[in-house]
Amino acid sequence: MNPQGGPPAAAPGEWQPRIAAIFCNWCTYTAADLAGVSRLKYAPNVRILRVMCSGRVDPQFILKALAEGADGVLIGGCHPGDCHYVEGNYKMLRRFRLLRRMLADLGIEDGRVRLEWISASEGDKVRTVVNDMVEKVRALGPLRLPERLKAWDREIGSEEVKSHG
Amino acid sequence: MADKPKVAFYWCASCGGCEEAVVDLAEDLLGVVEAVDIVFWPVAMDFKRKDVEALPDGSVLAALLNGAIRTSEQEEMAHLLRRKSRVLVAFGACAHLGGIPGLANQFSREQILKFVYEEAPTVVNPGRARPAPEHRVEGHGLTLPRFREGVRSLDQVVQVDYYIPGCPPTPKIVKAAVGALLTGQVPPRGATLAPDIALCDECPRKDSKPADLAFTEFRRPHKAALDPQKCLLAQGFLCMGPSTRGGCEALCIRGNMPCTGCFGPTSRVRDQGAKMLSSLASNVGAKDEAEIDRVLAGIPDPVGTFYRYGLPRSLLRRKAGTTPSGAP
């Protein structure tokens, strides 16, 4: 699939990657808006969540998305030096560098979690990045963490006991 | 005797340190023994499983269970004690979060058995014999508990009423918790019986923690001298204090060693490891990727560091792809 082109085609009934995209309000979300008003077509596999800054992205959000059924997580922030809050994107970059190592150790393939800098004027980059990520995650296949954990719970003959906390 | 409240202690996948923690109550233990009727405590007293089975359901005031759950026998005992007790307490880091044994969730059952019975340097086992759940010898049947695919915290097996954190829980925490249970002055069910604020709050070195840590390197305690006064993070040592529940009175830090996180997260954090990773990495000083990676290389084992006591209770619970049933 050519990432510069339109949305990747999928056969009906075929498994579709589900990607949680967490975009910062000032750059990448605005770029996604621009992609929309410019009528750029990209893969419909991303669910975009808006946060004020990529620095707000707690690694817990990423793990929770994966644990609850996302096949990948895309984080979008302002280019280095352009953060609306001066330093937020650097904080995200540092977390990402360590998180990707930890995720590899936990059996989550490189490429399922991705960080991109996309400025408000780069609507076309939203399309390119989303299409490219969807194709890469499609090649990796489904992550299926909720199903895997449920299957593991059945080992002891009961679904996970509901805990209070 | 009969009218005293009944209390049971049990251990599952644990090291015995939690049993020590009970003994560490020292002379205060005598007060506890005065006030309660201990109906089960395998490490110290000669009661059998059938004695517990003979008790009416719900007749035990509180069962304090330590250790993670790895085998079918531990599951059975957890269910039995749950049924017999009005209050089930996860005692210590292993029952609370999975603990050190929970680090085994980075490996499959097969990897563990293969290493332990075939590959470990101290093993001679040419027949590659492995323990079997059932075996017959000269007409006699022998059984062993089943070894599960992974390690679970107690609340992933049965419902838990309270958590007493720590590896092991400190005498002060245990005494307060036992007192609360005996007087019925307990918080809502599901609570962790310790302060709900990060360890830094009670750390004696709190004042020397700078607002901006700006890490330029991470140092490891076995390779560098630790200043006994200054905040360990400010010295570049990885201290889990910011993402760990307080209540231990910063014992490790008073011993000039960094916190390793055994009290688990506060109630506002779901995943202690992710939160600590976040706090620590955000505070690296560098801005370019290569320099950030160089600084973070000072943390060689993120999983073992950030989830030292809590991998089974984390959001991901285990390494993906390590269970046959969960293979894609």
Image (spheres, coloured by chain):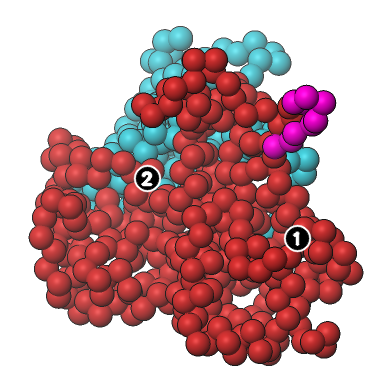
Chain colours: A cyan, B red
State the SS at label 2: helix
Q: Residue at x 87, y 64 (%)?
A: B54
The residue singled out by tag 1 in the image is: B48
Number of residue marks: 2
Pointer 1 or 2: first along the chain: 1
Question: Please, is residue A110 above or below residue B296 in the view?
Answer: above
Q: Residue at x 39, y 33 (%)?
A: A105
The secondary structure that dominates the magenta segment is: strand
The three-letter code of the residue at mark 2 reads Gly
Front-lying residue, A141 or A55: A141
Q: Residue at x 43, y 26 (%)?
A: B123
Specify the subunit that label 1 lies on.
B
Horizontally, residue B245 falls left or right of residue A69, namely left
Specify the subunit that label 2 lies on.
B
Q: Residue at x 70, y 76 (%)?
A: B38
Front-lying residue, B197 or A48: B197
The residue singled out by tag 2 in the image is: B304
Quarter residue A115 falls in: top left
